[in-house]
Image (tube, coloured by chain):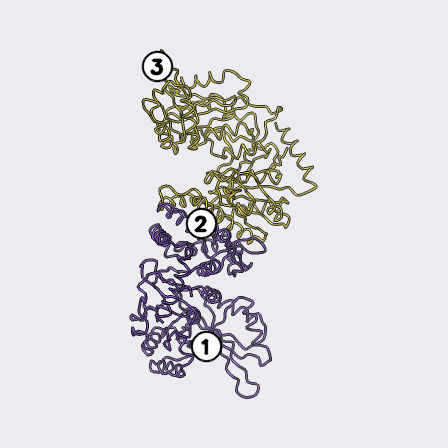
Chain colours: A yellow, B purple
Amino acid sequence: MVGLILRCMEAAAAKDSQEDRIVVMKFGGTSVAGPEEIKRAAARIVAARESGDRVVAVLSARGKTTDELVAAAYEISDRPDPREMDMLLSTGERVSCALCAMAIHDMGHHAISLTGSQAGIVTDSSHTKARIMEVKADRIREALGDEQIVLVAGFQGVSTDSRDVTTLGRGGSDTTAVAIAAALGASVCEIYTDVTGVFSADPRIVPDARKLPVVSYEEMLEMSAAGAKVLQLRSVEYARNNDVPIHCRSSFEDVPGTLVLPESETMERPIVTAVTHSTGESRVTVVGVRDEPGVAGRIFGALAEANVNVDVIIQNEPVGDNALADLSFTVDRDDLQTAVDVIDGLGDISNSIRTDEQIGKVSIVGAGMRSHPGVAAKVFEVMGDKRINIEMISTSPIKISCVIPADQVPEAVKGLHGAFGLGEDATFPEDPTGEHRPTVKP
Amino acid sequence: MVGLILRCMEAAAAKDSQEDRIVVMKFGGTSVAGPEEIKRAAARIVAARESGDRVVAVLSARGKTTDELVAAAYEISDRPDPREMDMLLSTGERVSCALCAMAIHDMGHHAISLTGSQAGIVTDSSHTKARIMEVKADRIREALGDEQIVLVAGFQGVSTDSRDVTTLGRGGSDTTAVAIAAALGASVCEIYTDVTGVFSADPRIVPDARKLPVVSYEEMLEMSAAGAKVLQLRSVEYARNNDVPIHCRSSFEDVPGTLVLPESETMERPIVTAVTHSTGESRVTVVGVRDEPGVAGRIFGALAEANVNVDVIIQNEPVGDNALADLSFTVDRDDLQTAVDVIDGLGDISNSIRTDEQIGKVSIVGAGMRSHPGVAAKVFEVMGDKRINIEMISTSPIKISCVIPADQVPEAVKGLHGAFGLGEDATFPEDPTGEHRPTVKP
């Protein structure tokens, strides 16, 4: 493992000796919350530039700005127009970028802020949840060529067809950063947040949780989907599809964080890498679903059309003739009312709909799980010992998720973290190279 | 006078019977300060649309937003980069437009918000005080053709050469509105503020000040330059050069305001239309200016280069051989330090520089002044009676300005307003037509 990283770094160093490396740095809302934070981010950016790298920094809106803008919109309208919501919300990141550029100027460096549109972030027209179609990075390249530090407003783009401002959904600045890194062939995309990396579990629940020096894209995808909030799920997909190395690290401490890299056959993998959890979902149970072909398809089709993301699904097999099945699934709590409305709107397809907001989800994620049977059995054993009732289960080759009562989530996380020995400081050294910003482009 | 307005309206009505009128409505910061104000502005806009007009509304930033953004910039830097200042400040108007569009949607109408750039407001590259070069109104026309109400972010544009966001300086939204009205051939540009029109004097100083139903562009230019804050000076110039009728009116009361129109020979004109005042200027006195050719030219050339607007200028004639002249002039208080620095930077051209911030200016403006001698004499008489020392004087064919001690400004305003009989309700009826939104395109 250490050998792999070192080899990657040597290859990158050989390549980079000919030309400057390009580094994309992304700073989240807490990292630009006030004047002091903005100056600290600016100092980070300037330090990277002074080390010889060409730097593009993607910034989020300051602190609670986006929340305040959303609140302002709902003061005006119960159903704010999505196009106008994007025009409104996109202002927050522009403010961050302009202020950070001013701070960098004061440090004697040249910086230019660009809106998503100016940076060439071209998206589809799905307002408030647009997807990046293309990054036309000409203007960024031009500015980098002029020895400028480039600051890009995260979370936003411009739609292909209507030339309107679009936004990428919550956490979208991660995706902006990864997309720009991909377009520029950057050495690394550094994601600066208020935590120092990706942990084996939430340290607020498990005090001996360990910072993971490296995780694979696949693991990170499962962890993001299972509740780890460090990286937006879509940014990880984008990074995997475009081979962009991500480095999650703290904007407050100058220590190495967690690298997110392609999985390699030479990687030694623990069976379980991390335990994640989420208490942001709710369960919908459609009781007594009519026994007709295609009913489930109609339900999930209608939910997809309403942009409701369904996570864990269970259908109880009906027992006996004329028996009716119960269909349960979990959705983001924010989507619960929409989900109920959608199913109500399908007419007479069931006896009733029940909802449960008191659920939580714990998951174990690990690339080594693929080749190790018996992991699920160990999960059940832990839950049994702790007298935690598993209400729903969902698995992938590298993940097992259990839906359990919300109030038992901390107990389950602690139990699983201990049972799989994740707190032991064994396999990975904290900083295999001694260098703080690893060069990891394979 | 009434006859003229009626003739204008008949002509406009004849022309407009073929096609919808286009009306540009501009709402200032107090008119969009909070959710209630935004909804009220939206209702105004919708009412105009429902009356059959095609409507473009130009909005300023909400209430104190611009001040807050400026403060945020100065928390970061003592000398914020102008390009980044524009990126920062331009967000305020976008927020107003997006929120107002949401409110209009809720009232069942179609609205689309456009940034200055999207609206085709093309400017030069003088960041923080850009000038409009061209309005490429294609997208506005397209949206109007689609039966949309168009909301345009005021105060901003995009620079021709560098495709950067620019701003037009304080009050620039007035100019945005007038420029769009000119480009579209709008019937009228309505400027909505927190006052009901242009008054014969500041009603806070002169309780019987009268709202003026009509003033000419020339008078309005002099009044804006002399301290009337209703309209930005540049917007009046733009309106005069492009024959755009302006209607200044209240966003809180649905009553006619003040029309700003071309002066016509048939207009009956009182000698003096209004008394205006300003306490926002300071005086610079360059004591003992070297008696060399071109020194004054160097001083004012250097001030112009530093973008310092000089208002009243006086040079004392030197008496006797080898005597030195004193040169005094007034500038905006904000520019005082810059002016002093500029003159210091010219080297050894004078004995010393004195400044005085305790000055004020009162002016009388009136198109009838041209053909009436003796107006200045009456001004001096009033000042003499009130024992007010006139320190500097500046005149134009339709204006007399006196620089006096700041603390005597209210007394001077009251005296002049009374002496010229401006409070008497004689010449103009308040609402000559009985119609609330006059059609005045000549």
Q: Does label 3 lie on the same chain as label 1?
A: no
Asked if residue A52 lies left or right of residue A26, the reply is right
Q: Is residue B175 above or below residue A77?
A: below
Q: Which residue is mark 3?
A: A323
Res A183 label? none
Residue B222 in view: yes
Judged from this view, the residue extending furthest toward the bottom is B320
Mark 1, secondary structure of its residue: strand
Q: Quadrant of the N terminus of chain A?
A: top right
In the rendered structure, which disc, 1 or 2, sits on the residue that comes first in sequence?
Answer: 2
Whole-angstrom CA distance, mark 3 to mark 2, is 55 Å
Q: Which residue is mark 2?
A: B113
Q: Which residue is mark 1?
A: B396
- Write the residue at 52% across / 24% down: A366
Type of residue at label 2?
A: Ser
Asked if residue A200 lies left or right of residue A81, the reply is right
